[in-house]
């Protein structure tokens, strides 16, 4: 009897297995004719609107449909998108007059997905939407420096800044369609809550990008079709699909079975497995995000420069990278990204791993080893705590290694980890409230070198994000100047000087730049991973299938 | 009976109110709250955060937020998600059929197989079959879902290519066959765990009943063995199972977080988990309140089912 049932169960399984739609004649995604490329996203986007959602998934899901005036390419260069060229002082696109600044954008002829032309009125509308207090914008940083957007003709937008704003190219990364959204922005669903925050457009946008929105099946996928009227390089494939695959093991299996073509931001624990897949290329891209150790410079022990420098010199970053991050994460030397024009390669030679020098520094500062090997001065032990986020294995391992490094030079380090929100929360988090000694976490830099929020003493909480509470008159002056100078060479000089001061004063230890692993099926060509906020979809119109 | 049901329903109202109040307070204890997601973005300045807080309504005192939420619930409005800005009811409804299909199939499969295996094991106590089922039950019950699910995928999807590696439909194909094909692995995953547990309950309950006097009496009356087992023993043995199944019913709504995550199934379990990560209070409150209501209702249904199965149980 059991055998009979077993037979029927097996029969049922094989019948179901036979339900498989024959895969040979359909590209992944089941489309016939014209290829479709499937990319994976670990999360489902909140909304297809990057004004109100700062999720990476929302950005990636939106990029194929939208255009901006200027975008950042994979080499961290600003390139024109809807704008005909990148406005600079040299090409008279940027005019400085006293304190104020005017930036003029010429638009390429382009159409929205519904056929209406993209005009300078849309540029103006985008700025107005950012500043509308009832719109749930994640950040108005920079937008509030604009006093007016003038539209002398349909193809020209003149952006007037109240003061010189050097990172002006970071703005207008997405242009909104005025004719579709104007009514929503102006309507309030509830007092103070714009209809824009709940707009149907957020689920099915009309944009001006290389792909048009097709369908969003909640929790499963979003599909796009090529836009034949795209103003730039016409898409080479018929469609794109974003597939939500929350589990990284499942994403691996789907990549292996061909269900997805692009597995973005793979776990570094999967590195060897992914490398072993025959028809897959693993792209290793240096990320703009870097691990670092913040010193609380208001802590009496850490206020002493010799202690900070000794800690910095005692850490073998190379070894941490090799042992914990499979050598994939690259050693960081400053808070600027090595590809940035403002990067200072000089600092690489400073502060090399040198425990002997660390000991000498501490000896010279009067810190003498006590009975247990931990140094003492004026009856105080050189004992500190390090705080990071709980549940992140690599960081917990790093802390274990750091304890050993510091012990070797006579500093005691104890671990005090907390959940992410307890570390980053405002105003009660450890970093914001200053209730920490050393903090191990990551920052993400941007293609623009402006770092005033991190190092200017006016940005010490509660006002800003200078969690190290670093105070340096020259850095204060330089960070402020950096936002006002537009000339690139001059700006580079400013930020190189800041990096040199930081290397000398060491208010924080730059540790490692993350590396992003994007595993791509070899049938996909033209994939160029982009470490900036443009994301990997930035050139999806150039993707094709072989 | 009717009176009993009405009384139970009325007493559950304060219970539910208490549950929502506790849930709402517990949510305030989540570190960081809904704004935590923004605090790691260096471009979000304190003044930006302040505006987001006002638009989300989080600037008001907690008790005001609670009564506001309760008030709109009483008018049938579950509110809007803090992050997607969409009505919560809409977000739940678009996921509900998916969860229902997955959990419902798993329930039917595991109930029919689990109960059958349990009954046969009990009737053939200490036989080879019994030992086999017992061994399977212990293995099945101790399998960690996150591991076993991935193993199923690796073997049946990645290596043998019999079944798809997660998802509910192939994109562009919404046929029933395609759905069935995608259902096999997740339903198997969920069923194996349930079958393991339920077959054990059924076995012990059945063993207890077949030793009782009324079963002996039935046999003594000369009834056929089939009738003794099905009409007399089985029916009585079902009573404890009813409670267990009734408590599993709210799962039809709540879904299974792990299984849905591993098999990329777009169900409510994942909606809940994603919302938990972002502290999307309105979505969490809605799912939890509906789940709590279902637990209360299903318990009541179980109690009613008892008296239908066993006339000795009377409510007055």
Image (spheres, helix red, strand yellow):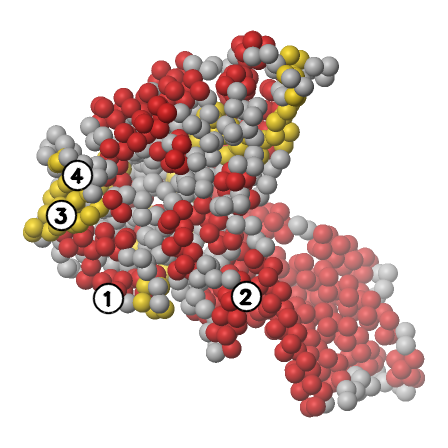
* Local secondary structure at mark 2: helix
Q: Residue at x 32, y 27 (%)?
A: A477
Do circles 4 and 2 both sit on a common chain?
no
Residue denoted by label 4: A101
Chain bearing mark 2: B
Residue positioned 39% across, 35% down in the render = A458
First in residue order: circle 3 vs circle 4: 4
- Mark number, residue B63: 2
Q: Nearer the viewer, mark 3 or mark 4?
A: 4
Give coordinates of residue A109: x percent, y percent.
11, 49
Mark pair 3, 4: CA separation: 14 Å
Dot 1 and dot 3 within a common chain: yes
Q: Which residue is mark 1?
A: A183
Residue, disc 3: A157
Q: Is residue A422 left or right of residue A134?
A: right
The Cα–Cα distance between marks 4 and 2, rounded to whole angstroms, is 48 Å
């Amino acid at each position: 009897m059991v055998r009979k049932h077993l037979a029927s169960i097996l029969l049922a399984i094989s019948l179901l297995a036979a339900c498989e739609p024959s895969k040979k004649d359909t590209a992944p995604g089941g489309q016939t004719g014209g290829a479709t490329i499937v990319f994976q996203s670990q999360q489902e986007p909140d909304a297809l609107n990057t004004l109100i959602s700062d999720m990476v998934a929302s950005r990636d899901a939106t990029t194929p449909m939208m255009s901006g005036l200027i975008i950042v390419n994979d080499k961290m260069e600003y390139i024109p998108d809807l704008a005909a060229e990148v406005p600079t002082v040299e090409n008279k696109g940027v005019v400085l007059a006293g304190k104020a600044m005017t930036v003029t954008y010429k638009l390429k002829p382009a159409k929205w997905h519904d056929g209406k032309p993209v005009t300078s009125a849309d540029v103006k509308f985008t700025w107005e939407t950012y500043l509308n207090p009832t719109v749930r914008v994640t950040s108005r940083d920079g937008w509030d420096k604009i006093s007016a957007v003038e539209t002398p003709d349909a193809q020209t937008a003149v952006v007037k800044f109240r003061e010189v704003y050097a990172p002006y190219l970071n703005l207008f990364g997405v242009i909104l369609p005025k004719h579709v959204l104007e009514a929503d922005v102006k309507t309030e669903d509830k007092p103070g809550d714009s209809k824009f925050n709940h707009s149907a457009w957020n689920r099915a946008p009309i944009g001006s990008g290389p792909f048009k929105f097709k369908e969003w099946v909640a929790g499963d996928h979003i599909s796009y079709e090529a836009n034949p009227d795209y103003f730039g390089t016409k898409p080479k494939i018929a469609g794109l699909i974003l597939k939500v695959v929350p589990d990284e093991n499942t994403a691996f299996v789907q990549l292996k079975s061909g269900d997805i073509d692009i597995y973005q931001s793979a776990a570094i624990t999967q590195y060897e497995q992914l490398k072993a897949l025959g028809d897959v290329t693993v792209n290793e891209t240096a990320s703009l995000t870097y691990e670092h150790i913040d010193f609380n410079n208001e802590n009496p022990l850490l206020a002493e420069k010799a202690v900070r420098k000794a800690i910095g010199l005692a850490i073998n970053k190379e070894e941490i990278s090799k042992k914990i991050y499979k050598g994939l994460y690259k050693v960081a030397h400053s808070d600027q990204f090595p590809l940035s024009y403002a990067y200072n390669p000089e600092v690489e030679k400073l502060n090399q791993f040198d425990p002997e020098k660390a000991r000498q520094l501490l000896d010279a500062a009067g810190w003498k080893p006590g009975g247990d090997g931990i140094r003492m001065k004026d009856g105080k032990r050189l004992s500190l705590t390090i705080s990071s986020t709980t549940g992140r294995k690599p960081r917990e391992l790093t802390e274990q290694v750091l304890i050993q490094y510091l012990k070797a030079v006579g500093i005691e380090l104890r671990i005090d980890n907390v959940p992410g929100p307890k570390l980053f929360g405002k105003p009660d988090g450890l970093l914001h409230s200053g209730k920490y000694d050393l903090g191990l976490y990551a920052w993400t830099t941007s293609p623009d070198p402006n770092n005033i929020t991190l190092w200017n003493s006016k940005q010490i909480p509660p006002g800003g994000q200078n969690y190290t509470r670093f105070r340096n008159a020259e850095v204060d002056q330089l960070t402020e100047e950096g936002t006002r100078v537009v000339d690139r060479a001059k700006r580079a000089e400013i930020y190189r000087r800041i990096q040199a001061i930081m290397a000398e004063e060491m208010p924080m230890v730059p540790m490692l730049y993350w590396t992003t692993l994007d595993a791509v099926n070899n049938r996909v060509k033209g994939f160029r991973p982009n470490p900036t906020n443009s994301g990997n979809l930035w050139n999806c119109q150039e993707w094709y299938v072989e | 009976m009717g009176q009993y049901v009405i009384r139970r329903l009325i007493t559950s109202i304060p219970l539910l109110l208490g549950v929502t109040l506790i849930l709402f307070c517990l949510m305030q204890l989540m570190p960081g709250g809904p704004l935590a997601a923004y605090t790691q973005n260096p471009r979000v300045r304190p003044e930006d955060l302040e505006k987001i807080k006002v638009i989300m309504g989080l600037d008001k005192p907690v008790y005001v937020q609670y009564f506001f939420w309760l008030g709109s619930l009483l008018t049938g409005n579950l509110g809007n998600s803090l992050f997607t800005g969409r009505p919560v009811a809409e977000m739940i409804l678009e996921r509900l059929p998916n969860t229902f299909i997955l959990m419902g199939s798993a329930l039917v499969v595991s109930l029919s197989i689990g109960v059958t295996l349990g009954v046969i094991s009990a009737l053939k106590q200490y036989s080879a079959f019994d030992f086999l089922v017992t061994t399977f039950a212990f293995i099945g019950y101790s399998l960690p879902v996150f591991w076993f699910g991935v193993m199923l995928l690796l073997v049946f999807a990645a290596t043998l290519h019999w079944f798809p590696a997660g998802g509910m439909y192939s994109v562009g194909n919404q046929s029933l066959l395609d759905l069935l094909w995608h259902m096999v692995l997740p339903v198997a995953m969920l069923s194996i765990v349930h079958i393991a547990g339920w077959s054990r309950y059924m076995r012990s309950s059945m063993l207890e009943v077949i030793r009782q006097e009324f079963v002996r009496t039935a046999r003594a009356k000369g009834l056929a063995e089939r009738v003794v087992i099905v009409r007399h023993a089985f029916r009585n043995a079902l009573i404890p199972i009813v409670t267990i199944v009734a408590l599993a019913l709210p799962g039809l709504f709540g879904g299974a977080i792990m299984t849905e995550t591993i098999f990329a199934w777009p169900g409510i379990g994942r909606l809940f988990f994603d919302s938990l990560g972002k502290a999307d209070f309105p979505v969490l409150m809605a799912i939890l309140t509906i789940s709590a209501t279902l637990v209360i209702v299903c318990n009541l249904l179980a109690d009613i089912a008892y008296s239908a199965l066993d006339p000795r149980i009377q409510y007055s």
